[in-house]
Amino acid sequence: MRFEYSSQFYAEVVCDLLVYPIFEEETKDAKTLEALHKSTRGVTKSVLESGEFKTELHRTCLIHKPAGMKASRLLLVGAGKKKEFNLAKLRELAGTAVRSARSVSCKSAAFLRRGSHPLRDAARVVAEGVLYGSYESDLHKTREKEERHLERLFLIAEKPAGAREAAAGLRRGEIVGNATNLARSLADEPSNILTPTQFAERAIAVGKEAGLEVEVLEREDMAKLGMNTLLAVARGSAEPPKLIILRIANQKRRSKSKSPLYAFIGKGVTFDSGGISIKPSEKMEDMKADMAGGAAVLGAMSALAQLEPKHQVIGLIPAVENLPGGRATKPGDVVKSLLGKTVEIINTDAEGRLIMADALAYARTLGATHLVDIATLTGACIIALGSVNAGMMGTDQMLMDMMRRNCSLTGEKLWQLPLDEDYRKAIRSEIADMKNVGNRQAGAITAAKFLQEFTEDTPWVHLDIAGVDLDHDGRPFAAKGATGFGVRTLAQLLL
């Protein structure tokens, strides 16, 4: 898709579809719409007066061959309340617009920027939203698909002096938008195709294109290092585990010697049956997306490699399958982690924290000064926060505050949960240093408390994205399936 900036008056832009957002406060008599009504020779005024079009967020009205305009169609899109119209809403609106454009087989569209957001930021989120709305999860459908891809998107701002700002914003939005869709495509892949080995191979391919150096540790490498909590999860599967390490090429030479080193660690369980503590069969197919955290790390790292972050960053993705089998880890087994701490495995379905424990510890051996992990870690987080917010916990309050402030820009909502030391007693073991699950209370917090044991004094933030990794209902601005949650959050953190 080509993204372009135009300072033309919107009525003069030649395209298949012109998108015009309208706020709830703008009534039929609003002065801000006088030019629109005049350009359409009163058609839009009639539509608003009749009540045919409601200006609630994401509501649309398509007008064919609008008189007085060079666009073949005019799409009015409800922008909701103006005071609530942040950059996240603008991104969603762009997604709604592109899905409407595709439904009528448009090849080119123009989006009129409205609102008071800086042009660079507006351009960026419009590009992200358009790409997000363009994604479909029908990766393996064999029937002939209709070609309804939008090929060209104009951003209209009617401000000639902003061309450079708009171009920079569109470029960044295109990079981050494509990275988000990369993460979505990985999480939508069935587990017979996206095995740990295939995950590593795709990371290598992405790395070559984006400018990432990719290292893959094999089972033997991890065994020599003593990553026994990670390897314990992989024991029941015929698929070998992988630890994927991502570095931005030449970044160390560009950075100051005392620059902090951030590590993003993403859970990469390509399928989670629960192991011996097997899950119920209902909705088990969704467990192909238990590697959504790892996909987010790969997506974010691919974007950062192209956008040059302010600080050094590495990415780690422990990739495994968790299956029952004759060699599978059993409840009651005790394993020693890379850090030397012993873990009594009470429930083999609490596997994500086991692989993340060794990955977090290993990131510290690589020199990481700040840790951010992202994982579909607990069903308890879904009970607590539903499918609206991801859970956030950690020891770096400044970093968590920054991530919360970014939510209105990224559109990825985060809610901080407590991490009091009193929660640790839930994971005390009688025969080992700790056990991998507590009781049914505060499950998301006790899981994070387990991870904290392996971060020790390194500043750390944990994101539990269970509940926000998949969308089962579909939205006006996005298809059903994987959401790519976390790519924008991680990229924004370092940009």
Image (spheres, rainbow, N blue to C red):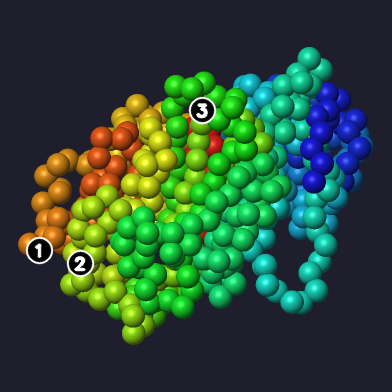
User: Of the residues under marks 2 and 1, which one precedes in the sequence?
Assistant: 2
**Residue 291, position in %: x, y?**
47, 60
**Residue 230, position in %: x, y?**
36, 61
User: Of the residues under marks 1 and 3, which one precedes in the sequence?
Assistant: 3
Please name the residue shown 67% across and 60% down the image. 136
Please name the residue shown 67% across and 41% down the image. 211
The residue wearing badge 3 is 311
User: Of the residues under marks 3 and 2, which one precedes in the sequence?
Assistant: 3
| Mark 3 → mark 2, Cα distance in angstroms | 38 Å
The residue wearing badge 2 is 334
Classify mark 3: helix, strand or loop: loop
- Is residue 262 left or right of 180 when viewed as pictured? left
> Which labelled disc corresponds to residue 489?
none
67 relative to 258, above or below: below
Circles 3, 2 touching at the beta carbon (< 8 Å): no
> Badge 2: few (under 14), some or many (20 or more) residues near its Cα, within 10 Å?
many
> Which labelled disc corresponds to residue 431?
1
Please name the residue shown 77% across and 33% down the image. 155
The part of the image, by quadrant, that contains residue 36 is top right
| Mark 1 → mark 3, Cα distance in angstroms | 42 Å
Q: Amino acid at mark 3?
A: His
Q: Amino acid at mark 1?
A: Ile
255 relative to 414, above or below: above
| Mark 2 → mark 1, Cα distance in angstroms | 9 Å
The answer to whether one can see residue 294 in this image is no
